[in-house]
Amino acid sequence: MPPQLASVYNRLAQRSRDGIAVSEVVNGSCSACYISLRPQMHVEVKRGDKIVTCENCTRILYVTEKEAEVGAS
């Protein structure tokens, strides 16, 4: 894991109530807090070239390959 990502992950995990610092994006929403992402944020998560956090619960967002493919079609 890149040092920058490890640092962000550890900081968020310590702040989280349940110790989980990541959340999958499902159908355009954060699967931890169920808030719909802004379209641009969803694009940034799918692109995967930077760390994107949920504006509501602050978890690091990620998409599965399946979700990325659905959005690309």
Image: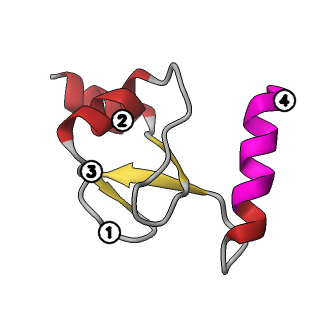
The answer to which of marks 1 and 4 sits earlier in the sequence is 4
Q: CA distance from mark 3 to mark 1?
A: 9 Å
- Is residue 54 among what the camera can see? yes
Circle 3: element type: loop
Looking at the rendered structure, which numbered label has been put on residue 34? 1
Task: Name the one closer to the observer, 23 or 37.
Answer: 37
Residue carrying label 3? 37
The quarter of the picture where the N terminus appears is top right
Residue carrying label 4? 3
Query: The residue under label 2 is which amino acid type?
Result: Lys
Query: The residue under label 1 is which amino acid type?
Result: Tyr
Seen at 68% across and 78% down, the residue is: 18
Query: The residue under label 4 is which amino acid type?
Result: Pro
Give the number of marks: 4
Looking at the rendered structure, which numbered label has been put on residue 17? none
Task: Name the one closer to the observer, 56 or 35.
Answer: 56
Q: Is residue 55 left or right of residue 6?
A: left
State which region is magenta: 1-12
Q: Which numbered disc, 1 or 4, marks the residue closer to the eye?
A: 4
Residue 65 location in percent, x, y? 42, 31
Residue 58 is covered by the magenta coloring: no
Residue carrying label 2? 66
Q: CA distance from mark 1 to mark 4?
A: 29 Å
Q: Quadrant of residue 22?
A: bottom right
